[in-house]
Amino acid sequence: MTAMTRFRLLLLIALAAQPALASAQTPPTVSQPATQPLPGTLQPVPGVTQPVPGVSQPVPGTTQPPVTVPQPTPGVMPPTPGLTRQPGVPSPRPGLTQPGPAVPQPAPTLTQPTPGGAQPPGALQLEPAGAKPTAADPMAPREPLPAPAGLPFATPQEAVGREIAIEEAVTIALANQPTIQTRAASYVAAQQRVAQALSPLLPQLSGLWNGFQQKTVQSVTVASTGQNVTLATVGVSTQASVTASQLLFDFGKTWAATDVAKAQSQSAREDVEVQKDLIALAVKQSYYGLLLASRLVVVNAQALDRADLNLRSAQGFFEVGTQPRFAVTRAEVDVANARVSLIRAQNAVSLTRIALNTVMGIPVNAPTRVVDILAYEPFPVDRDSLVAEALRKRAEYRQAKFQSDAAEATVRQTFRNFFPDIVASGTYGAARPDMNEIYSYGIQLNWSIFDGGNKVARHKEAKALLDAAKSNVRDVELTIWQQVEQGYVNLVSAEEQIGAAQKAVESAQENFRLSQGRFDAGVGTIIELTDAQLALTQAQSTQAQALTDYRNAIAQLERNLGRR
């Protein structure tokens, strides 16, 4: 007789004696109603044959026929393996003729608000029914806060009652985001500064009118008497005149100032493009964040369903004495933890929707739904032209060059300030009380010969700022190169992680199936089963995160290349 045969005989003897020992040691229990499935949990997936009472069951420890596990499709959430029992009724186990009644576990009491009545102490008010994401509808919006009156935010028609594509989300954001409108207004203001800088080259015309009443007092000596007499004279004077002037020559000061304003205006225009690129990236990241949160709702709902099924199984084993109380309490812990994870995932859906609405510039409480594109799609790139494309399209690079042009024009302007201005001007008008004609015209040369070194210091400052602007151009070139290189490396890494995550899901599904079979056969422990369940949940979450990271890597590389 071999050692394996002896081991199996001992195992059969121990299993045969176990019901008698259990009946002698297990205290009597109070019959309880069968445990009902928790509200909001997923129902088990049928598809595996259940044992029938009265039919001989396989001996624990013997080889079981293999169960075919369907292979998941990349980017699609795989079904939950091993969920085959009817909800609310503990299934029989191999070697058990009649399972005992399940012992229901107390659940937290969640009280609905009573209209017109006070809430009991410690009661938790629930949201309206259906106002949370579920596995069937992971993007279901919660009941939002009421919108404040008077705010100028309206939900676009294309986002009402339908799922919006990512291109539509970017378009909505570019049209409604207030930060883009702020940059656009600043660009319009910069354009007006160009006209301000050019205005000294055009004729200047001004008018003047004044009217005064004057009283003068003088002392006069009377010749006949030799006495001094004070005479007071009151008079009214009025003058009206028009003055015209024209800058004849300023050695290029005004043209240099105009070049400075033009370069700064072009820099402001590129600032608008930079903000648009940043908003487009933020929209894509929030879009993929909402998809990830929705996918994790499904993952955690399936985990809660598996944990609840394991709890009912552990209760049935405990009632017949084949598992200790520890198996039940450990399963209860797993159910509670799974429920917490599901609540967090549901909350993440609400938070990511709020973030997406905010970055699109639409009402924060809009029930936005998005098209699920969280799947792998190849992203073709030309490695040899990526950096050149980024330098050609990036608004930051053009903006740095315009800032350098403005600094160079400022150097020219401060140098020409050392030279004089030649201005022609003329005035024509009349003066009262008799409104006699008055006029004047001529040419004026204005030249500040010495101002305490102010012009010299300003010129040196402008030259230093020009050196800084040129260095900034080089820094932007290096930064763009770095960002493109990092974006490409991250994209390759994210693509490789998808395959590894898919393999992890397949292995975790098989591991969970085997662990559940061992537990059903009575040779596995609850720790082994819950560890396998946790590994499956983590693998599915990692797969969803890997797909999200891949999409975010594409969005970041497009941003680094200057695409939208």
Image (cartoon, helix red, strand yellow):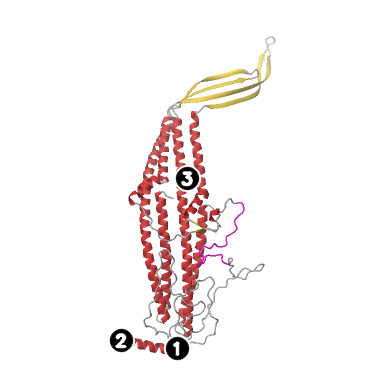
Name the chief secondary structure element in magenta: loop
Q: Earlier in the sequence, mark 2 or mark 1?
A: 2
Q: Secondary structure at mark 1?
A: helix
Q: Can residue 334 be seen here? A: no
Would residue 334 appear left or right of 224 to someone viewing this image? left
**Residue linked to disc 3:** 272
Crowding near the residue tagged with mark 1, few <14, some 14–19, many ≥20 C-alpha atoms within 10 Å: some
Total number of numbered discs in the rendering: 3
Q: Specify whether residue 424 is painted magenta.
A: no
Proximity of marks 2 and 3: CB atoms separated by less than 8 Å:
no
First in sequence: mark 2 or mark 3? 2
* Spot occupied by residue 512 in the image (x, y as percentages of width and height): 41, 74
Q: Which residues are magenta?
A: 129-150
3 or 1: tag closer to the N-terminus: 1
Residue 412 coordinates in the image, percent (x, y): 41, 33
Going by the numbered disc 2, the residue's amino acid type is Ala
Rendering coords of residue 273 (x, y %): 46, 46
Mark 1 belongs to which amino acid?
Pro
Q: Which mark is residue 19?
A: 1
Residue found 64% across the figure and 19% down from its top: 432
Q: In front here: 546 or 339?
A: 546
Towards the viewer: 360 or 380: 380
Helix, strand or loop status at disc 3: helix
Q: Residue at x 49, y 78 (%)?
A: 312
| Residue 1 position (above or below residue 208) | below
Q: Are marks 3 and 1 in contact (CB under 8 Å)?
A: no
